[in-house]
């Protein structure tokens, strides 16, 4: 989810303004009731001007903008829940590593060990221009910087050893200074002395979530991530992606079972299969759907889709310095489909790895089959234009999840305190 407006065009929204965070806090509570591992708050750091070369459509429709900062929301969600993991997106382009490590440490303590960081490098020129750059560094360089960044924050998280806080009244010692160390990092991109001035947080460091899709991005994810979120086209591709990540992880000496790969899906639910299909078709045929989807894909991929004919195939395979994986999934190069078909495909194509349309019972059974074929680890439930209303939450939490629980596919209660431990359960 994103800290954005709700489905404001649709008859069932959130009720009230999204900006006081109350709806999203209730969303976290709803997902906790359904025993989800985590809620992920995505983020971008610009007002896109890619679609049609203008801010107009994004702003007029409320697509990918406005977006409020995920971190304060993560804190509000964490304070209102007890078990759910809360993952916030922060860009290595935007935060100096010391500030990010300190923020993550603070939020992990505030949430009693349930915080996760979605590690992104940012993928848009317009975002780079908000941080003193003329344009986005090339992907290779972004990942090279991000690798050193992970090294720095890792050392900062460990700059307080376990047990550094003694709180020994008799000896008059709050913290044992021999267990708090500077890191004296001096690398190609960063120079950081350390130590952190926050105590070691319950998880030591936040859970790392990542979504690298390019070969370089996958290597990065396989090296660092506790959980990887991905979009694939169908079951076979899901399996190939997960196997590939596991092989890359093993190659750098990690146990692949400790990395949880979650595939994005957008279930459409109904009391009957026909009702679910009808709702799905209605969404696709809504007057603004095509333009909203294209504005959203344009913002994410830095490619202006307004310049292509909707009823023709794309003229060439498109390449971006932005999110290439997302672009490839969307453009289905070689399929001969028109742009309109690409948008309609799989409820907008960019977000659902497999089609899930039907009753909660049928969709739960299909999710089980898919996981069986893929080999694991789970799904990340999302929505086509990344906006969510209250009704959809209830359908998922009180319709779909109980069916998954009946099949023994998801938990009925949390067994651990820390997000990292809960994540390892499935
Ligand atoms: C499910 C999912 C969620 C993502 N969330 C964000 C996000 O919130 N912010 C962001 O800047 N990038 C986000 N990304 C983009 C990824 O971080 C990454 O840049 C993208 O998948 C392309 O991979 P590559 O950089 O290896 O080409 C997301 C990607 C996926 C698949």
Image (spheres, rainbow, N blue to C red):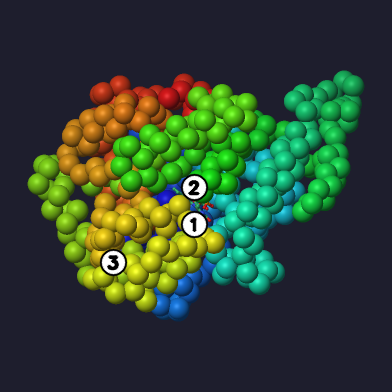
Q: Secondary structure at mark 3?
A: loop
Task: Say whether mark 1 is within 8 Å of ligand 1.
Answer: yes
Distance from Cα at disc 3 to Cα at disc 2: 24 Å
Q: Position of residue 179 (x, y in %)?
A: 84, 28
Task: Say whether mark 2 is within 8 Å of ligand 1.
Answer: yes
Q: Secondary structure at mark 1?
A: loop
Distance from Cα at disc 1 to Cα at disc 3: 21 Å
The vertical placement of 374 against 296, above or below, is above
**Lateral position of residue 296 relative to residue 284, left or right:** right
**Lateral position of residue 185 relative to residue 412, left or right:** right
Q: Secondary structure at mark 2?
A: loop
The disc, 2 or 1, on the residue closer to the chain's N-terminal end is 2
- Single out the mark in the foreground, 1 or 3: 3
The disc, 1 or 3, on the residue closer to the chain's N-terminal end is 3
Q: Position of residue 130 (x, y in %)?
A: 63, 69
Please say if the residues under marks 2 and 1 sit with CB atoms less than 8 Å apart.
yes
Indicate which disc residue 323 carries: 1
Indicate which disc residue 213 carries: 2
- Single out the mark in the foreground, 3 or 2: 3
Indicate which disc residue 400 carries: none
Distance from Cα at disc 2 to Cα at disc 1: 8 Å
Q: Is residue 289 visible?
A: no
Taking the spot 63% from the left edge, 53% from the top edge, the residue there is 140
Q: Position of residue 337 (x, y in %)?
A: 25, 61
Taking the spot 31% from the left edge, 37% from the top edge, the residue there is 235
Other residues around mark 3 within 10 Å, as few (<14) / some (14–19) / many (≥20): some
The disc, 3 or 2, on the residue closer to the chain's N-terminal end is 2
Q: Label 3, on which residue? A: 313
Q: Is residue 287 visible?
A: yes
Please say if the residues under marks 3 and 2 sit with CB atoms less than 8 Å apart.
no
């Amino acid at each position: 989810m994103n800290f954005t407006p709700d489905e404001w065009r649709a008859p069932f929204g959130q009720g009230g303004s999204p900006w006081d965070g109350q709806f999203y806090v209730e969303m976290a509570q709803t997902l906790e009731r359904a025993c989800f591992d985590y809620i992920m708050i995505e983020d971008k750091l610009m007002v896109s001007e890619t679609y049609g070369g203008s801010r107009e459509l994004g702003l007029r429709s409320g697509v990918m903008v406005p977006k409020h900062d995920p971190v304060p929301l993560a804190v509000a969600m964490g304070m209102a829940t007890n078990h759910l993991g809360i993952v916030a997106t922060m860009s290595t382009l935007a935060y100096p590593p010391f500030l990010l490590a300190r923020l993550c440490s603070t939020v992990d303590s505030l949430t009693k060990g349930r915080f996760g960081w979605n590690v992104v490098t940012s993928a848009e020129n317009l975002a780079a221009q908000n941080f003193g750059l003329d344009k986005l560094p090339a992907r290779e360089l972004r990942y090279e910087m991000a690798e050193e960044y992970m090294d720095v924050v890792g050392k900062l998280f460990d700059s307080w050893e376990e047990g550094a806080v003694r709180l020994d009244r008799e000896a008059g010692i709050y913290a044992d200074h021999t267990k708090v160390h500077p890191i004296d990092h001096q690398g190609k991109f960063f120079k950081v002395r350390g130590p952190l001035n926050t105590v070691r947080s319950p998880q030591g460091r936040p859970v790392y979530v990542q979504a690298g899709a390019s070969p370089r991005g996958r290597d990065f994810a396989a090296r660092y991530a506790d959980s990887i979120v991905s979009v694939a086209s169908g079951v076979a591709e899901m399996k190939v992606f997960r196997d590939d990540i596991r092989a890359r992880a093993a190659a750098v000496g990690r146990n692949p079972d400790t990395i949880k790969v979650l595939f994005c899906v957008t279930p459409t639910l109904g009391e009957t299969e026909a009702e679910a299909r009808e709702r799905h078709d209605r969404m696709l045929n809504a007057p603004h759907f095509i333009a909203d989807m294209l504005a959203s894909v344009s913002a994410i991929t830095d490619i202006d889709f307004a310049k292509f004919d909707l009823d023709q195939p794309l003229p060439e395979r498109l390449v971006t310095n932005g999110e290439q994986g997302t672009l490839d999934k969307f453009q289905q190069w070689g399929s001969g489909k028109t742009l309109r078909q690409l948008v309609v495909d799989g409820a907008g194509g960019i977000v659902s790895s497999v089609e899930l349309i039907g009753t909660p019972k049928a969709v739960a059974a299909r999710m089980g089959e898919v996981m069986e074929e893929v080999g694991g680890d789970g799904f990340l439930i999302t929505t086509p234009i990344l906006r969510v209303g209250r009704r959809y939450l209830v359908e998922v939490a009180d319709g779909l999840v109980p069916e998954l629980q009946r099949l023994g596919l998801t938990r009925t209660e949390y067994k651990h305190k820390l997000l990292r431990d809960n994540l390892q359960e499935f």
